[in-house]
Image (tube, rainbow, N blue to C red):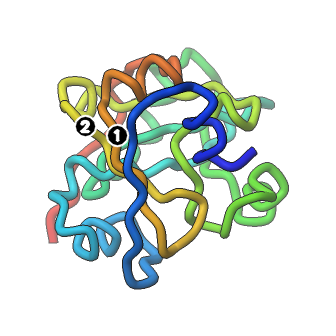
Amino acid sequence: MRVTDFLDKSGVEYEVTEHVPAFTAQQMASAEHEPGRYVAKPVIVRAGDEYLMCVLPAPCKIDLRKLKEQLGTDSVELADESEIGKVFEDCELGAEPPFGNLYDLPTIIDKALEGDDHITFQAGTHKQAVHMSMADYRRLAKPKVLDFGYHVTS
């Protein structure tokens, strides 16, 4: 199901914008003239035998050791592109929306996003972004909040 169909059926307010093709969350933040802290970057991990969607701000990366400890599992590793492509067949690779529940995946957001008033994310393509309130996002995605990200300095 396309994310915009889901949002339409949910009755929430959102805006879709077009931008030049962006292949990273930071590139999309720049194209959308949006601070990277408001741009959600979904990262798929495998924790034991289960896939999870971890959502964090664009300028951050996952501390896998910290995530493993918080999940209480023996192993956590990044899923590879072939695994991701099978799960998100309706999306361009790398443009997945941060709604794991649309793909039968538990969703975890980093606490850095928790207090934001809005969120911006890829709409399943490298040329479209969705802007919506964080309150609506949290109500629809039902994410668990953990502390697993760290800010990357360039």
As drawn, 3 above or below 19? above
Q: Residues within 10 Å of mark 2 (few under 14, many from 20)?
A: some
> Quick one: 53 or 130, which is closer to the camera?
130
Q: Inspect the image, locate mark 2, and give the three-letter code of the amino acid beneath it.
A: His
> Quick one: 108 or 118, which is closer to the camera?
118
Q: Is residue 42 visible?
A: yes
Question: Which residue has dot 2 on it?
Answer: 118
Residue at image position (19%, 31%) is 117
In this picture, residue 34 sits left or right of residue 76 = left
Quadrant in the picture for residue 153: bottom left
In this picture, residue 51 sits left or right of residue 53 = right
Secondary-structure class at tag 2: strand
> Quick one: 107 or 89, which is closer to the camera?
89
In this picture, residue 96 sits left or right of residue 131 = right
Residue at image position (26%, 68%) is 32
Residue at image position (74%, 37%) is 103
* Disc 2 to disc 1: CB gap under 8 Å: yes
Q: CA distance from mark 2 to mark 1?
A: 6 Å
Q: Inspect the image, locate mark 1, and give the three-letter code of the amino acid beneath it.
A: Met
As drawn, 75 above or below 20? above
Dividing the image into 4 quarters, which one contains the N terminus?
Answer: top right
Residue at image position (45%, 29%) is 12
> Quick one: 56 or 123, which is closer to the camera?
123
Question: Which residue has dot 1 on it?
Answer: 132
Q: Is residue 75 visible?
A: no
Residue 111 locus on image (x, y percent): 28, 26
Number of numbered discs overlaid on the protein picture? 2
Looking at marks 2 and 1 on the same chain, the residue that comes earlier in the sequence is marked by: 2
